[in-house]
Image: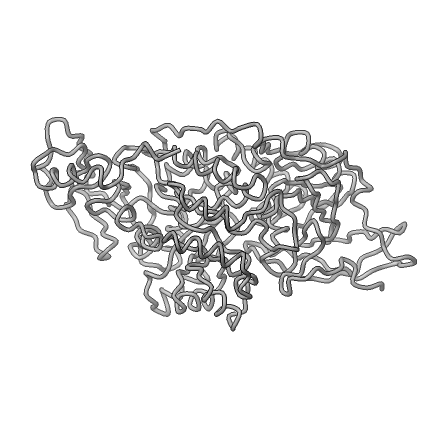
Amino acid sequence: MTDIAFPSWPDVAPHLISVAAGRAFADTVIRQGKWVNVHTREVLPDHDIAIVAGRIAYVGPDASYCTGPDTEVIEANGRFMIPGLCDAHLHIESGMLTPAEFARAVIPHGTTSMFTDPHEIANVLGLDGVKYMHDEALMQPVNIFTQMPSCAPSAPGLETTGYEISPEDVAEAMSWPGIVGLGEMMNFPGVANADPKMLAEIAATQRAGKTVGGHYASPDLGPNFAAYVAGGPADDHEGTCEADAIARVRQGMRSMMRLGSAWYDVETQITAVTEKGLDPRSFILCTDDCHSGTLVNDGHMNRVVRHAIACGCDPVVALQMATINTATHFGLERDIGSITPGRRADVILTSDLTELPIELVIARGKIVAESGSIKVDCPHLDWPDSARGTIHLGHELAGKDFELAAPAGANAVTANVIGVVENQAPTKALKADLPVRNGLVEGDGDTMQIALVERHRGTGGVTNAFVSGFGYQGKMAMASTVAHDSHHMIVVGTDRDQMALAANRLAEVGGGVTLFRDGEEMALVELPIAGLMSDQPATEVAAKAEALGEAMQACGCTLNNAYMQHSLLALVVIPELRISDLGLVDVRTFQKIPVIESVT
C-alpha cells in the first residue's frame, strides 16, 4: 500500500517552479485573504495563494500572473488563511472509528494532518493490526502518518496482551511508507533502567532517522526523568502541570499539551508560555484520546486551539503549536505545517482567529469540507475476518465469577481501591473499609466492584478488585472491550449478576461497550473490529456513545466523559493504581499488591 493519491515534491517541483515563475498557470488560486504566517508570527492582509499539483507554488500580494482561464479561483474575501491543523499525538481507535471514518469526522473541523499511534490494535492483533491501520490511513484524502507502536505490552510482567511487539517488528515497520517514528514509549522504567528491548526499538527508529515518541507518566522529575530523557524520547504528552511542561522543554523535549475528551491538560501547562514566557516553539498541542461524540459534537484540533486561546494564548502562537511546531518536530516542515511554497496545499479559511469557525478546508489542493460538510470520499480498507471476532471468554460468565472471597472469619476488610480522578488519566490509590457478607467482600457506597476479564486467549480468567468515583447507584454494570492498553474487558458494577450479563453481551456482539441495569440493556456501542472500532459512520457511533453517556448518568455517574475514565483503568503505566489480568498494580512502584490489605 502506497500513498498513490499524492505525489512527492521531486515529482512536482518543475510544475511548482513554472507556476511561481509565471511560465504556467496554477490549478487553483485563493484570492485576497489574510495570510497567517506561522514562520514569522505575522498576519498579512491582501494576499493570494497559487496551487498546482496539490502543493503551494506562490504566496504573495498578486497571483494574477499565474491565473489562467482554467484556474479555479476561490475568493477568500478578506478571511484568514491558516494552515491545516495537525494533531501531534492521537489514537484513532479511541474515537471508536476506523481511520477512514475518523478522517471523515475530523476533516470538517480543519484537521488535515494526524500523527497516530495504533498501539491499541497492536495489543490485540500485533503487527498485522498496525499494518491494517497504516494501509487505510494512506488511502485518505488528508495526511495520516503512523507511528509504530513501541510497547505491547506496556509493562512487561504486569499484564498479558494478545500480541507482543518486538524490536524486529519495529525495524520492519520503519521501512513502510507512512511510518514517521516510534509511538509513545510507555515503558519509562524500562528506558530509565536501560532495558535492552526498549533501547533496541529506540535505536531502530533513530537509525531510520525518525522521531521517538515519549510517555513519561511519573511525577518524579529527578534522576529517573533524566535517565528517561537520555534514553532518546523526543516529546511527552503526560504532563499535567506547569512544572512538568517546563522540565520537559528545558531538557530538549517537546511538551505536547493535550485536550481530549477527558484529558484537560492544556490550561495547567500553557502558563509556561503565557506567564513564564518560555519559547513557544517547544510546545505542541494534541488530543491523545477523543471519542466519537466529542469529534461529532465539539470538534477536534480546532477545539484544542480555541481552548488554548481561551486560556490566554495569543491566537497565532496557538496556531503555531498546532501546525509548524508539529511539522518541525517530525521533520516534515518542508512538507506540511505552513502556507509557504513547496508545502502541501492544506489551507483553512476562517473569519475569526479567536473563535476559529472552520468555513472552508482545502487539503492537498482540493476542497475537502465546507461549512461543516465533508466534500470528499474517505475510502475503507477491506478489513479481514481475522480482525473481527476477537472476544474469547472461554466460557459463559456468571455472577459467581465476580465474587471476591474474604479471609476466613472476617467480618470486614480494608481494601486497596482505585480512585477515579475527573478529567485526568492518573488515578488515586485509596483504601476503604468494606463489609463481608456470606464470606464475600462487598462494595459499599461509592466503592464498587471492578473486574478485568481475559478476552484474548479464552482462559476464563477474571481479576476482581474495587473502584471508587463513578457514583453508580442501583443494580447495574458497564463493560467495555476498550481497556487500554492490553484491551481485555473491564467490567464495573454494583451487582455481580449484572456484570455477568454485560460481559456475556460483549462476547455475543464481538466487542464494544454496554451498560445493564436491573437485567435490561440500557446502551450498546458495537465495536466489532478488534473489539475497539466500528466501521460505521461517526455520526451513528457518536449517537450510540451519547446514549451510553446518558445511561451512565441515569445510573448516577456525573463525571465528565466517564467512559474515558473507565477505559483507562487497566493502563498499568499511569499512576497510581490499576487493574490487570495479573492482579492489582501499584504503578508508583510497578509492583502487584493485594486487593485485601488487612482484616478489620
- Quadrant of residue 206 in the image? bottom left
Q: Position of residue 288 (x, y in %)?
A: 47, 49
Report the coloring of the rendering: one colour
Query: How many numbered markers are drawn?
Result: 0
Of the 4 image quadrants, the one containing the N terminus is: top left
The answer to which of 59 and 227 lies nearer the viewer is: 227
Seen at 44% across and 53% down, the residue is 204
Percent x, y of residue 382: 48, 27
Name the foreground residue: 353 vs 542.
542
Residue visible at 83% across and 56% down in the picture: 435
Quarter holding residue 572: bottom right
Q: Is residue 157 left or right of residue 33?
A: right
Quarter placement of the C terminus:
bottom right
User: Viewer-proximal residue, 557 or 115?
Assistant: 115
| Coordinates of residue 280 in the picture (x, y in percent) | 33, 62
Side of 470 relative to 179 (left or right): right
14, above or below 160, in the image? above
Q: Is 32 located above or below residue 572 in the figure?
A: above
Horizontal and vertical percent position of residue 299: 42, 42
